[in-house]
Amino acid sequence: MTDAHLHSVDWLIMILYFVFVLGIGFALKRYMKTSKDFFQAGRALPAWICGLAFISANLGAQEVIGMGASGAKYGLETAHFYGIGAIPAMIFVGIFMMPFYYGSKARSVPEFLRLRFDEKTRALNACSFAVMTVFSSGISMYAMARLIQALHVFDSLFNSLGLPPGGIFTFAIILSAIIVLCYIFLGGLTSAIYNEVLQFFLIIAGFLPLVLIGLKNIGGWSGLKAALPVEYMHQWRGVLHPSTNPMGIDIIGIGMGLGFVLGAGYWCTDFLVIQTAMASHNMDSARRVPLIAAVPKMLFPFLVILPGLIAIAIPTPHSTTTVTRAADGTITHEIQVVSPQVEQGKGIVPAKINPVTGQPMLDASGKPLLDYDMATPNMLLHYFPTGILGLGLTALLASFMSGMAGNVTAFNTVFTYDLYQSYIHKGASDRHYLKVGRWATVGGILLSIATAYAAISFNNIMDTLQLVFSFVNAPLFATFLLGMFSKRTTGHGAFTGLIFGTGAAVIHHGLTLPIEAHVGIHGGWLHVIHTYPSDMAMNFYGAIWAFSANFIVTVIVSRFSPPKPESELVGLVHSLTPKPETSHLVWWKRPEALAVAILLGAIALNIFFA
């Protein structure tokens, strides 16, 4: 593994960032007078702020580290997460779904489900969503702790105290949790949004130089293509011939599993991102928020995927002995020794070591697992000099903390409004719910710490995240589609469909397993009846099964149960809702015109990377 050499200027940049984020929390505390201020940012923020926060809420460790890891593991196939899995869905949520969310005055996605269906559907979604946010936040904690381990930040401290180095992982998790807890506890959603905007600009400043320097050193685009197998450098060729690409996924898995179910399911139903759009000051702004976010989203494959590709393309370091002979005939041996962890890796992606036990991790065939999550951090350590290294590492730390903060604010909102207020303590004062929201933040952080350890078994946190989404977002998207576009869909149908959809995902996970994976958290814990080429391929098809089961069961049960009166569905079902008024806007400011331009840009990028 690449060693870090941090100097005072690097430390200064990182310390200034932590002071700044905590300062935002303290500065906003005096404005958190009501629960609406704390949970919804007062619904008073401008569209561009919410737009940057919308994309930044997704730019946590899962995006910055996970996409770099997926680039190293799967190649340019990873770009499908943008052109197929993100941009179309962001357009759809801005044009079609945001009028329902914002117009309904719902404070959360589960509350919208109560308005459209009933209380039991709301409760089920609130519980599943709370679990998902805790796992997502835990993944960010895990990634941040791994980075701190790689930097050897606390090695000298632990050595001086006589503590085992394995404890650094846990210590780093707790430290990051305390920092996030402080500024969310004080400033609520507003604090999270402003920190997400700060993080967006830090990511640009930290990763653009990394990509440019990396490409220059490897010989540009042609040099990168020459250093990697051909299947790594084609976005569409591998989809048409699945056996030739590392992900092992076909057109059905990409189109249906990623593009329709997981992609649209995430962007259209995940309250983590939806809450940032709902914080804007009016309907027009709320509709433009996902569209504004889609513009930089199209360019992010260049910033977050290419570092992984470059990391895997760099020659793998090996122990060497160089013999030199001086003028007087004296022989000098120069020995460069690298750790087995590095030698067993590929490029500057090392073999994976369990961060708690310190033991090597092997796949089912006994081969070392590659630690793809370290691709992007090692790129920073490999290429950046003093000062620039501090900026790049601060960008990484910002992404981790922003991901944690976004998930924790979504958790405290759903817990307070959809669980505590509805089923535990109704009719309390607004001040009481504000207090509950703050303590829910503490609870969410503690649960996230526990789930951070589940990510240890995966060598790509994006695999972990998509597995969680296949359980939660995939079946939920079927409920939303039927609820918004069919007035005949009932609460009994939605509730039963969600149970069967989630159950289908669980059963699929228990009966299938990725090749070379151990039975357990990766799957196969019931009985292995089918193996997939990769974790990601398994996630895509698990999502398809979950969506399909939910859709079919919801339709069948709805046929035999009474729907809500049409008068109660105005503003909640497409056919019964007036079209949003945009005639007062200049044509190029209308969401529809912006959506068409973004869609054309996405198509052009897909053609370019084909």
Image: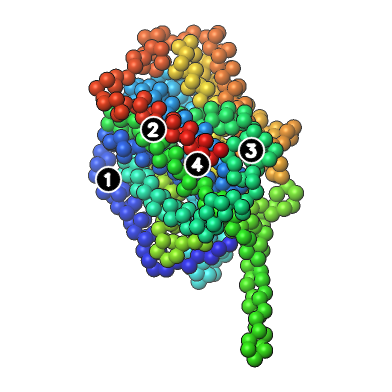
Q: CA distance from mark 1 to mark 2?
A: 25 Å
Vertical relation: 452 (above or below) 506: below
- Secondary structure of the residue carrying numbered label 2: helix
Q: CA distance from mark 1 to mark 4?
A: 25 Å
Figure label count: 4
Horizontal arrangement in the rendering, residue 196 relative to residue 353 (left or right): left
Judging by the rendered image, the residue that carries numbered circle 1 is 28
> Amino acid under label 3?
Gly
Judging by the rendered image, the residue that carries numbered circle 2 is 290
Q: Which mark is residue 238?
A: 3
Judging by the rendered image, the residue that carries numbered circle 4 is 136
Q: Are marks 1 and 2 in contact (CB under 8 Å)?
A: no
Neighbour class for label 2 at 10 Å: few (<14), some, many (≥20)?
Answer: many
> Amino acid under label 4?
Ser
Q: Are marks 2 and 4 in contact (CB under 8 Å)?
A: no
Q: Quadrant of residue 290?
A: top left
Residue at left offset 39%, top offset 53%: 205
Front-most of 332 and 376? 332
Mark earlier in primary sequence (2, 3): 3
Whole-percent x and y of residue 102? 34, 25
Q: CA distance from mark 2 to mark 3?
A: 30 Å
Residue at left offset 34%, top offset 51%: 21
Q: Are marks 1 and 4 in contact (CB under 8 Å)?
A: no
Residue at left offset 47%, top offset 30%: 88
Colouring convention used in this rendered image of the protein: rainbow
Mark earlier in primary sequence (3, 1): 1
